Amino acid sequence: MSQEMEMGIAQMDQLKAQIESIRMQRDSLGNVALDYDRSIVVMESMKSGTSEEVLLPIGGQVFVRSKILEMEKLLVDQGAGIIMDISIDDAILQIKDRKEKVIQAVSSLDRSIQELMGRYQEISNKTQQLYNDQMMTGAGPEKTF
């Protein structure tokens, strides 16, 4: 096998690993967006006064039923460990803004995946052509017997 073909195969392997890593990041961010959606639904129902009881996750996929004592304000993480008491409307706006940023990040990752897949296809075509050329010149593996 020619050195050029070996380099092409190595580049393809590296690109596959990069694509898989980015897909995992995208999936993780997709889960964050779904979590934001669930939060928004709960906050909207609190705002309308239709929900006073919620399931509170305590870890390990275990939930406890809880009654909401305060229906107008929520404690929301503002980053860097700062938690503020804000209105439901403001919390909904913040979560929607965060979700939009996550969606933009997912779109960026999708574009990166498409670019890497394009490069993968180019290298694959070039490597295949090198292989075909090698076979035509008689230097291929079946010509060595």
Image (spheres, rainbow, N blue to C red):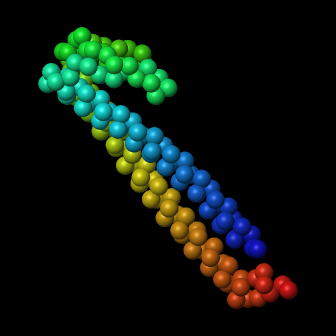
As drawn, 85 above or below 26: above
Residue 88 as seen in the image, left or right of residue 99: left
Picture coordinates of residue 11, whole percent (x, y)? 63, 61
- Residue lying furthest top in this view? 69
Residue 93 as seen in the image, left or right of residue 32: left
The residue at the point 22 percent across, 11 percent down is 70
The residue at the point 53 percent across, 54 percent down is 19
Picture coordinates of residue 54, whole percent (x, y)? 29, 22
Residue 89, visible in the rendered structure: no
Residue 54 as seen in the image, left or right of residue 120: left
The answer to which image quadrant residue 129 occupies is bottom right
Residue 43, visible in the rendered structure: yes
Residue 92 as seen in the image, left or right of residue 123: left
On the rendered image, what quadrant is the N terminus found in? bottom right
The residue at the point 41 percent across, 52 percent down is 110
Picture coordinates of residue 45, whole percent (x, y)? 19, 27
Picture coordinates of residue 107, whole percent (x, y)? 37, 49
The answer to which image quadrant residue 44 occupies is top left
The answer to which image quadrant residue 76 occupies is top left
Most foreground residue, 68 or 12:
68
The residue at the point 51 percent across, 58 percent down is 116
On the rendered image, what quadrant is the C terminus found in? bottom right
